[in-house]
Amino acid sequence: MSSELDKRRRTHGDQFAARLLEKVDTDENTREPFDESRPRSREDIMLDVRLNDGHRKGFSYSYLVTVEYEPKDVIQVEFATGVVRIEGRRLVRLYDSLLQHRARYVQEGNESEDGLKLEESAHIDAITIEEKS
């Protein structure tokens, strides 16, 4: 009986470890373009916008006005305090995450990172922030 319980624990543990490993980036030179929070968590209060130069700015989801996806892989995210324009490739999943207030951050990539990613991977080429006065 205890061996059956041990087997179930190992299986559950193995599944958990596999999920964690999926999140770990195997190549230190690439960063994920965005990350999603867990459903029903408090992690998604603000969207952290990260630019290549190290500049970061948080936008409160409570002030999110609109999210617009353009088929040429451009997303416009309008907040009461500013507009964030995201350009890249394969950004539909990010658009869905923004609609659900689940994107924890968006990370501007660079050309060397883009070259290391698979063609079917999401990548953010540029992020611009336009402040509202």
Image (spheres, rainbow, N blue to C red):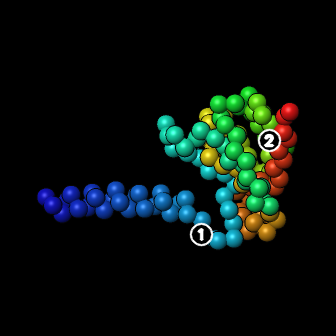
Which residue sits at x=50%, y=63%? 21
Front residue of this view, candidates 64 and 31: 64
Quarter of the figure with the N terminus: bottom left
Which residue sits at x=35%, y=60%? 13
Left or right of residue 36: residue 70? right
Q: Is residue 115 above or below residue 70?
A: below
Name the quadrant containing residue 16. bottom left
Q: Secondary structure at mark 1?
A: loop
Q: Amino acid at mark 2?
A: Val
Crowd around label 1: few <14 · some 14–19 · many ≥20 (10 Å): few
Front residue of this view, candidates 90 and 46: 46
Residue 39: % across, % down: 51, 39
Residue 70 in view, yes or no: no
Among numbered discs 2 and 1, the one appearing first in the sequence: 1
Direction top: furthest residue: 65
Crowd around label 2: few <14 · some 14–19 · many ≥20 (10 Å): some
Residue 64: % across, % down: 70, 31
Residue 55: % across, % down: 77, 56
Direction left: furthest residue: 1
Quarter of the figure with the C terminus: top right
Left or right of residue 100: residue 19? left
Residue 11 in view, yes or no: yes
Q: Which residue is mark 2?
A: 84
Front residue of this view, candidates 79 and 39: 79
Q: Amino acid at mark 1?
A: Thr
Which residue sits at x=76%, y=30%? 80
Q: Which residue is mark 1?
A: 26
Real-space Cα separation, disc 2 to disc 1, in angstroms = 29 Å
